[in-house]
Image (spheres, rainbow, N blue to C red):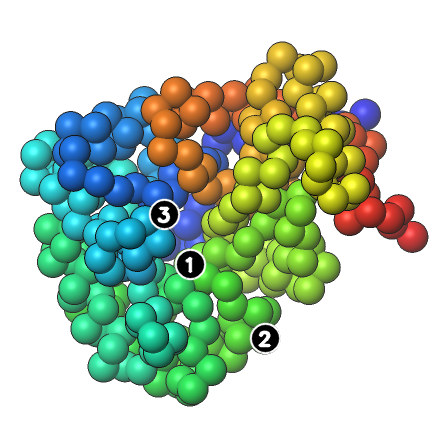
Amino acid sequence: MSELRLSADPVPLGATGITVSSLAWGMWRFKGTDVAHATSLVKAALDAGITLFDTADIYGPDNGEPFGASEALLGRVFAADPGLRGQMVLATKGGIRMGVPYDSSSAYISEAVDASLKRLGVDHVDLWQIHRPDLLAHPAEVAEALDRLVTSGRARAVGVSNFTPAQVAALTSYLETPLASIQPEFSALATKPLFDGTMDQAMQMGLAVLAWSPLGQGRLGTVNADAAPNVRAAAEVIARVAKEQGVSATAVAYAFVGAHPARPIPIVGTQTAARIVEAKDALKVSFTREQWYEILQSAIGERLP
């Protein structure tokens, strides 16, 4: 029987010519004032073979910090150790405004990118993504703004996060710059991208898929007797596979995401160095088709037809 696994080979970032690791590190919870500690986390990710680092300008308020705090902390890391910037593919996101909530107007996209670059202390990012779709922005206006980011050199590539396939199609119909990536929530407990056309469109268009919350808000890492029946069932299958293969349950959950043929890149969200390093054990995991579908069917609480 064929095996399914998270590939150790680099993943193309769309048609940009940029390649990234098959695991990414996310900085939603990257916080604090200890630059030495923050630097140690960045280095732990690099040592684990992770080259794609994903942050956003909105990362901060959820941690009790100001808007832009996560980017600013990473900027202080770069200032303390300038060589780190060149070792990574740096991605950030924008388009969420406190209290608005979404703004993808041309003027705001330009303003948001410039503010991110200033906080990060860099002259460009490798990937800039619209964090969530602005229902009041015409895709032609958004496309024009994204094209200008690339032509101005402020971003090497552009992508979107939390867009539907229809929204992606509308945007790309106006873009001159090929869209490089999409970023959906995807895990054994967030399976909508498998059924709503997101993954199919990604494969058709050659988009990189950055999967946020691949551990299902942490629910797949442990078996919780008080969890909903489908959550507990999925965690139990994952725990069994983990035991059989001598890895952690989190490694199996990451591998489940990455085993899809669209080659989704799980975004590792932990802010603990040892767990960042442990994430690379996902590369050791392999599934039979039966095992992968067992996890899926347990998670959705029904057998596929």
Identity, as a three-letter code, of the amino acid under mark 1: Ala
Residue occupying image coordinates x 15% and y 28%: 36
- Which of the two residues, 245 or 68, is positioned nearer the viewer here? 68
Q: Which x, y percent locates residue 31?
A: 26, 42
Instruction: Name the residue that disc number 3 marks.
Output: 28
Residue 264 quadrant = top right
Give amino acid for label 2: Ala
**Mark 3 residue type:** Trp
Task: Answer whether labels 3 and 2 touch (C-beta < 8 Å).
Answer: no
Front residue of 162/168: it is 162
Q: Is residue 293 visible?
A: no
Mark 1 or mark 2, which is nearer the start of the sequence? 2
**Residue 71: x percent and y percent?**
22, 51
| Residue that numbered label 1 is attached to | 180
Helix, strand or loop at mark 3 = loop
- Cβ–Cβ below 8 Å for labels 2 and 1? no
Q: Quadrant of the N terminus?
A: top right
Q: Residue at position x 35%, y 85% from top?
A: 141
- Residue at which label 2 appears: 166
How packed mark 3 is, by other alpha carbons closer than 10 Å (few <14, some 14-19, many 20 or more), is many
Q: Earlier in the sequence, mark 3 or mark 1?
A: 3
* Of labels 2 and 1, the one closer to you: 2
Report how far apart the C-alphas of labels 3 and 1 lie in the structure: 21 Å
Secondary structure at numbered mark 1: loop
